[in-house]
Image (spheres, rainbow, N blue to C red):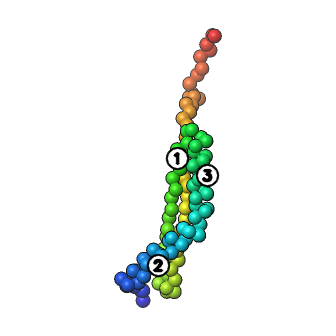
Amino acid sequence: MPQEISNERLQQIAAEAAKKLPELMGEREEDILSDFHAAVQDAHEDEDSKMPKLKLAFSLEYDLQTSMLGLALKWTVNRKTSDVVQLEDPNQTQLPLEE
């Protein structure tokens, strides 16, 4: 028989998530900031590099059978550097030019 979630349960999940997100961020605040500051420093040292972007993802997983609510915080710091290179055509024959 399929389990259902009531409006009250959904509100309870939202309330728990709202309470736990700041706690999870606080627990890893030093790591998150350290990762981001390192990426910013790298971007300043590499003139061609773009400033990094910090991405935070907060996910919830609710198990209907056990009523357990799993909460996860994930962060990434995207870094990017780029360059453009002209490649020679391997099928193009080189003419002998005199200098």
The answer to whether residue 72 is seen in the rendering is no
Q: Residue under label 1, please give it.
A: 51
Q: CA distance from mark 2 to mark 1?
A: 34 Å
Where does label 3 land, which residue?
A: 38
Crowd class of label 1 (few under 14; some 14 to 19; many from 20; radius 10 Å): some
Amino acid at pointer 3:
Ala
Task: Name the residue nearer the viewer: 15 or 69.
Answer: 15
* Res. 16 mark: 2
Residue 52 appears in the picture as rendered: yes
Amino acid type indicated by mark 1: Met
Callout 2 amino acid:
Glu
Quadrant including the N terminus: bottom left
Residue in the image at 51% along x and 75% along y: 20
Q: Nearer the viewer, residue 44 or 17?
A: 44
- The secondary structure type at the circle numbered 1 is strand
- Relative to 55, does residue 88 appear above or below in the rendering? above
Looking at the rendered structure, the secondary structure element under dot 3 is helix
At x 57% / y 38%, what residue is drawn? 47
| Quarter in which the C terminus is drawn | top right
Between disc 3 and disc 2, whose residue precedes? 2
Q: Residue furthest top?
A: 98
